Amino acid sequence: AWVHGDPRKVIYPTDSYGQFCGQKDTVNENKTILFYFNILKCASPVVLINLQCPTTQLCVSKCPDRFATYIDVQASYRYKPDQWNYFRQFCKPGFNNPRKSVAQVLRDEDCPSMIIPSRPFLKRCFPDFSTKNGVLTVANQTTFRDGRGKTRNVTDLREAANGINSVLDARSVGVKIFEDYAISWYWILIGLFIAMIVSLLFLVLLRFTAGVLFWIFIFGVIGIIGYGIWHCYWEYDHLKGIPGSDLTVYDIGFQTDFRVYLQLRQTWLAFMILLCIVEVVIILMLIFLRNRIRIAIALLKEGSRAIGYIMSTLFYPIVTFVLIAICISYWAVTAVFLATSGEPVYKVMANQTLCKYANLTCDPETFNKTNVTKLCPGAQCTFAFYGGESLYHKYIFIFQLANAFVFLWLVNFAIALGQCTLAGAFASYYWASQKPADIPLWPLFSSFGRAIRYHTGSLAFGALILAIVQLIRVILEYLDHKLKGTQNSFTRFLLCCLKCCFWCLEKFLKFINRNAYIMIAIYGKNFCTSAKEAFFLLMRNVVRVAVLDKVTDFLLFLGKILVAGGVGVLAFFFFTQRIPIFAQEAPALNYYWVPLLTVIIGSYLVAHGFFSVYAMCVDTLFLCFCEDLERNDGSTAKPYFMSASLHRILGKKELNPKKA
């Protein structure tokens, strides 16, 4: 890929001669935009972007800004030379023969039959469509002459216009979103910093008041959702009787300004019903899991105590993030080089639909010496796309799969390295006889060094198994996409079953790998042995796995919701200028939901980063606890290493004194 690839094929558009538009030190250096002779031949913007529109394409310095036809310009070139000079910049380079007959010019496609006002988008000239009083127009006109003696309506461009307008609307929304980010980015960073502080405080406070704090944030989540239900009902009742508020979402269709939907009663009713369902589900789960929650609190306290002694573990996710970012960058760059490693492919483009040579590959250097131009007058050998017929080009798709496989392998290895490192650090805490006196110095760095020096092969092997399953899932998704239009019900059913089975297999392998890495960090055995011992250890304690491990995961998820929801509510009141103290500081935004959603999603990810360390801590302590129960019996010779509080919660006999 690095030898054959050329990213310029992505950066620069390519004209009909295979030349890049806007490339330095070429004839097209100042011509950065691609112009299409006959935009009517292009069915949709997707065709234009893929460079497969069956019309001549030239590099130009700017798009046309007026209506003009070649017939009119040729007829007036003697007394209006400025019009001819303007029009011929959209003709083929070097063409300056206005005396040539119109029929020959259009047959040879020396010049376009017409030009229409356009504007550049994605470095290509698109018609300047707009809507005036619900009527589609181009430069405020509803008709235009096509240069072939016909007056056509702008609606003839509707097939292309529909897609183009949606793209341009999205572009307009994108510009406004960019403006909102530009004036609110520092407030977003402040919100994420608050989320980090809240997450850190949450974990630290669990060490001292796990039970009380747990019920506080449980009722906090219930209260926030309850406030949301009340607010939705208030908005629903407030809009009663207001004209237009009883319309449905289906009636108004899709709107780029989402504030329109907030003026509908149906929107607030849907929000209220959704929040009520969530509220009921949470309350029912709390009722049925109340006894298990009491048991989970003991592990929360122990995990908080462990993190309190090894605070550096909270910032290890940054290392994993950097490693994954490097993997993503390497994969993306290699994929671009692979995708652009083809050679220019030229095809015969004929005006006659019955030309038997149409769409066949050709050589532009020898094309004029063939009989194609005689049998198909006006036919040209123009650039179509990048590809090739060599053995290398035939297997580019296989190379892309190999690149994707390596990407999955490296990402899974980075995650495995983080899990093994954290497990080693927390295991050193659990197996310390006297805490914190017997905890090794710099436990996180020591665990990281052990993982790199001794366990790289085991981690790579576990990541390899997971990457193979994930690659199979990617291939199944690709096949599902390709076969989506098939009418074979059995094929669709079989594909759906395979996707479901491999999804379950991936989840199972992630669970096994996670616990295998913990056993590797504790004992230093190879992957297969550690995975087998972890699996059977969990099977012998399957009830405890369900009661402690999964309930703890649920509690941590509620913690993420509380952090994201609390910071989100604060951001909502701030960006909507409902906090009197900061009303003057709040920026004026096009869409207040842009920074609001960014803060909410960012806060959730920040909390997830902290709580993922905490979840790994709880899983490690739980596995160590199960191993502790099987290896020791609480006697003086074999004392338990678990804490006294965890020991009492789980109903074991009183601990005997440990040996110092």
Image (cartoon, helix red, strand yellow):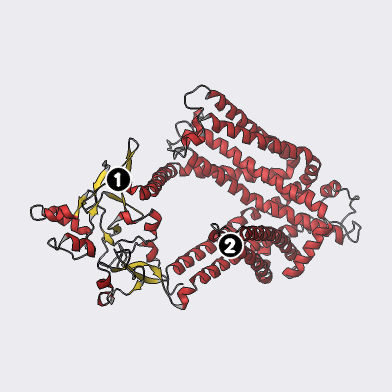
In which quarter of the view is residue 124 placed? bottom left
Q: Nearer the viewer, residue 449 or 78?
A: 78
* Above-or-below relation of 400 to 239: below
Element at label 1: helix
Q: Earlier in the sequence, mark 1 or mark 2?
A: 1
What residue sits 28% from the left and 50% below the top? 118
Q: Position of residue 84 (x, y in %)?
A: 15, 56
Q: Nearer the viewer, residue 414 or 538?
A: 538
Q: Position of residue 425 (x, y in %)?
A: 70, 59
Q: What amino acid is labelled 1 in the image?
A: Val
Residue ranking furthest to the front? 354
Alpha carbon distance from label 1 to label 2:
43 Å
Q: Position of residue 193 (x, y in %)?
A: 55, 45
What residue sits 40% from the left and 49% below the top? 163
Q: Of circles 1 and 2, which is in front?
A: 1
* Above-or-below relation of 584 to 113: above
Going by the image, does 506 lie left or right of 328? Answer: right
Q: Which residue is mark 1?
A: 154
Going by the image, does 76 lie left or right of 405? Answer: left
Q: Quadrant of the C terminus?
A: bottom right
In which quarter of the view is residue 453 placed? bottom right
Q: What amino acid is labelled 2 in the image?
A: Val
Q: Which residue is mark 2?
A: 474
Number of on-image labels: 2
Element at label 2: helix
Residue ranking furthest to the top? 241
Answer yes or no: is residue 156 visible.
yes
Q: Position of residue 65 (x, y in %)?
A: 24, 49
Going by the image, does 351 lie left or right of 78? Answer: right
